[in-house]
């Protein structure tokens, strides 16, 4: 899964949860999926930040 796909899925989850038409079990399941996706995106962003830092350090010698 790419960062963009995860973000898109989180948007879908947010929209469904905002509807207010879900049962408690489905709401909790979607919430849990959203938490996992947020952690995935956070890790992806940290990876990018580390790469940028390495590149900047190489550039600055």
Image (cartoon, rainbow, N blue to C red):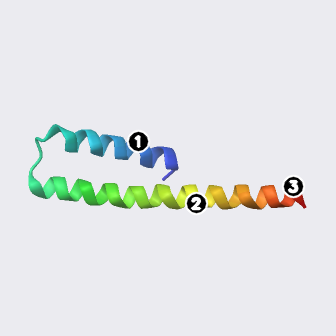
Q: Name the residue under label 1.
A: 8
SS of the residue under disc 1: helix
Identify the mark nearer the N-term, 3 or 2: 2
Residue at x 43%, y 61% (from the top left corner): 39
- Nearest the eye: 59 or 2: 59
Crowding at dot 2, Cα within 10 Å, few <14 / some 14-19 / many 20+, comes out as few
In the current view of this chain or complex, which residue is farthest to the front?
60
Distance from label 3 to label 2 (Cα)?
20 Å
Q: Name the residue under label 2.
A: 46
Left or right: 51 in relation to 11: right
Residue at image location 13% in from the left, 41% down from the top = 20
In what element is the residue under mark 2? Answer: helix
Residue 53: percent from the left, percent from the top?
A: 73, 59
Closer mark to the observer between disc 3 and disc 1? 3
Mark 3 / mark 1, whichever is N-terminal: 1
Mark linked to residue 59? 3
**How far is the residue under mark 1 from the one under mark 2?**
19 Å
Report, in whole angstroms, how far the alpha carbon at label 3 lies from the one at label 1: 34 Å
Does the CB distance between marks 3 and 2 fall below 8 Å? no
| Mark 1 Cα shell of 10 Å, populated few (<14), some (14-19), many (≥20) | few
Q: At x 70% / y 58%, what residue is drawn?
A: 51
In the rendered image of this protein, does residue 44 appear above or below residue 14?
Answer: below
Task: Give the x, y percent position of residue 25.
Answer: 12, 58
The spot of residue 7 in percent (x, y) is: 43, 45
Q: Residue placed at 31% from the left, 57% from the top? A: 33
């Amino acid at each position: 899964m790419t960062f963009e796909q995860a973000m898109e899925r989180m948007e879908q989850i947010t929209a469904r949860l905002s509807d207010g038409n879900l049962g408690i079990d489905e709401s909790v399941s979607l919430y849990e999926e959203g938490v996992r996706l947020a952690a995935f995106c956070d890790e992806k962003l940290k990876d990018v930040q580390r790469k940028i830092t390495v590149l900047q350090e190489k550039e600055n010698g």
